[in-house]
Image (spheres, helix red, strand yellow):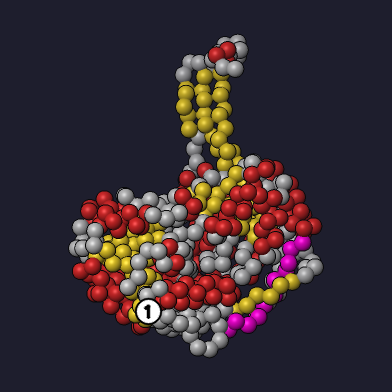
Amino acid sequence: MSEFVMTIDGATPAPEAVFEVLNPATGEVFAEAPECTTRQLDAAFDAATKAQRAWKLDEGARRSALKKMADVLFAATAELAPILTAEQGKPLADASVEVMASAIWCQYFADLETPPQVIQDDGEARVDVVRRPMGVVAAITPWNFPLTLAFWKIAPALLAGNTLVLKPSPFTPLTTLKVAEMLRDTLPPGVLNVTSGGDELGAWMSEHPQARKISFTGSIETGKKVAVSAAPDLKRLTLELGGNDPAIVLDDADPALVARAIFAGAFNNNGQVCSAIKRVYVPERLYDDVVEALAASATDIKVGDGAEPDTKLGPINNRPQYERVSELVSDAVAHGAKAVTGGHPMDGRGYFYEPTILADISDGVRIVDEEQVGPALPDIPYRDLDDAVERANSTHFGLSGSVWGTDADRAAEIAGRLECGTAWVNTHLALGPQQPFGGFKWSGLGVENGPWGLSEFTELQVVHRSKSADGLNLGTAGLVS
């Protein structure tokens, strides 16, 4: 691996300290990343503040830059994918898709039109409602999709006229650092600054006086801390937090077909997706067939080092998450659940865990009630559909969910009863740059993607132009205090 550096004001600051980055397939150190100091973080925010003054003035230049960024990412896919696999663990094919998805997000926002809204245009006045940039955005990204989720923030924030200081997860900093270095010739210095470091760096960013907006993706626990840090300065927030996403199988579903699709929706990225299926509610009469089909998928899939060409599921990304999945599965078995497949760590090096299907389990067990984020799926039988919907909603989580059945209209009606930001019908994890994504309850504040996500990086401004002959029309000014 080459040297990895931070990008601050379009340059490489000399590292004052470094931290180790592990390959989760081996559990061994394979690279180092720079540890950002408070002085360097201040320099990053200073650079972003200065760069934003000119960056916000030329929308055409911003759109052009986003298109060039997409070109850089597409051209660098073969170089970036192995780095992403080495630090995150996902198969090379999935890593390539992640890089290309980041480019697609840039292309989408480069072409997204944002016309002002005219709310009055008559003989008295023209009144436009327009979107203005916020200033400097502090962006903090997670380890499961380090590059894609960075560009969920970078692309709309830059289009809106903001500049960024971004921190990737300390488990997966390398690909993001490398991309920022590649983009230096595409963006003016200071527009995109990428730092690296641990949780303390994230806290410094959340509290930094020059950040006007914080966009955070991560756990609910950390998201609450970010909100507390942002409150004294009234920083704007977008928080995309955890999910415990239910799938409800209806009694008219085909067990074999549904099980294959649900397995894909639960075990994508080895289950390390905030909006992946985390629990499945199955009618009693279909229960055994669905569990058997899910178990067959779990048994057949190839688990291994993401660098190997036939690997479909890689390792869990980091030791804390590996230990959490192990703990939750052990707790479920101790409470009477049956591990139909899996149920144990895999032999050998790295953070590999057997794909696990849990049966004979219900609500009240931790792996059903909490967010596991790993390759273990609890399957819960139900007798009454209304009760299943109630149980699916009886949680602080509300990110996404799905309903599966032959009668799509009936399934859509049930999906509409789910208390979550995205309710899918006969699919799961169907996402795109044009589609808003966010959560109910503790699963987040605000949304990302589409024009709605772009708006999250702007402030509303009313531009009122009087058309009176003397220019002194005060309208209703005398009626308000």
In screen coordinates, is 53 left or right of 463?
Answer: right
Could you tell me the amino acid type at mark 1? Ala
Question: Magenta includes 275?
Answer: no
Residue 311 vertical placement versus 143 (above, below): below
Residue 79 vertical placement versus 421 (above, below): below
Q: In which quarter of the image is the N terminus?
A: bottom right
The quarter of the picture where residue 233 lies is top right
Residue 452 vertical placement versus 370 (above, below): above
Q: Give the range drawn in magenta.
A: 26-37
Question: Magenta includes 30?
Answer: yes
Image coordinates of residue 392 in percent, x first then y, are 35, 57
The structure residue drawn at horizontal position 60% and vertical position 14%, both measured from the top left corner, is 471
The structure residue drawn at horizontal position 46% and vertical position 50%, both measured from the top left corner, is 441
Judged from this view, the residue extending furthest toward the top is: 470
The structure residue drawn at horizontal position 39% and vertical position 54%, both measured from the top left corner, is 394
Image coordinates of residue 195 in percent, x first then y, are 69, 61
In screen coordinates, is 121 left or right of 287?
Answer: right
Label 1: which residue?
Answer: 339
Of residues 141 and 100, the one nearer the viewer is 141
In screen coordinates, is 248 left or right of 94?
Answer: left
Image coordinates of residue 296 in percent, x first then y, are 31, 80
Of residues 81 and 244, the one nearer the viewer is 244
